[in-house]
Amino acid sequence: MKKSMNVTWLGEHRFVGVNPSGQQLLIDNSPTKIGVSPMDALLGALATCTAVDVVDIMAKRRTPLTSYRIEVEGERAETHPKRYTHITVRHIAGGSGVMLDALTKAVHLSHEKYCSVAASLNAEMSVEAVVEESAVPS
């Protein structure tokens, strides 16, 4: 299954990504940010990917969550490409009948089996860069 997004430069270091369904994502690394940075977006993608799994797993176990938040923090390398060297994803959740061991199991299932963002971060993957010249507007 292929996924895609078209990203258009808006000026400065600001970009808008649009998926085939038309949903938009504003990525902004300019001095006056109105969107999230690319690295913040990566943290958010990881947090929400795993959160969706945890919510679903807990609901299937008939112990739905009534409160849930994720605190995600990434440590970056000092030298370029300044990638994340360590990410901590802290799940803080509760609900009637929710036991810590069941919540822990759901979190581990997500991080180790179901979350495609976590799997992508943990995997060797190929990235192909293709360059094309655009028509110059007159």
Image (cartoon, helix red, strand yellow):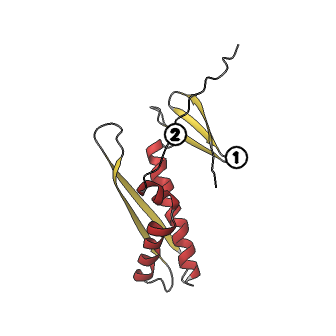
Q: Residue at x 61, y 41 (%)?
A: 17
Q: Residue at x 55, y 66 (%)?
A: 52
In this rendering, position of residue 135 left or right of residue 26: right
26 over 105 or under it: above or below: above
In this rendering, position of residue 21 left or right of residue 124: right
State the image coordinates of residue 72 (x, y, percent, origin top left): 40, 58
Q: Nearer the viewer, residue 110 or 27?
A: 110
Mark 2 → mark 1, Cα distance in angstroms: 21 Å
State the image coordinates of residue 7 (x, y, percent, origin top left): 60, 37
Sequence-earlier tag: 2 or 1: 1
Per the rendering, the mark at residue 20 is 1
**Residue to which mark 2 is pinned:** 128
For label 1, the crowd category at 10 Å Cα-Cα, with few meaning under 14, some 14 to 19 and many 20 or more, is few
Q: Residue at x 34, y 41 (%)?
A: 82
Identify the amino acid type marked 2. Glu
Identify the amino acid type marked 1. Pro
Q: Nearer the viewer, mark 2 or mark 1?
A: 2
Residue 122 image-quadrant placement: bottom left
95 over 92 or under it: above or below: below
For label 2, the crowd category at 10 Å Cα-Cα, with few meaning under 14, some 14 to 19 and many 20 or more, is few
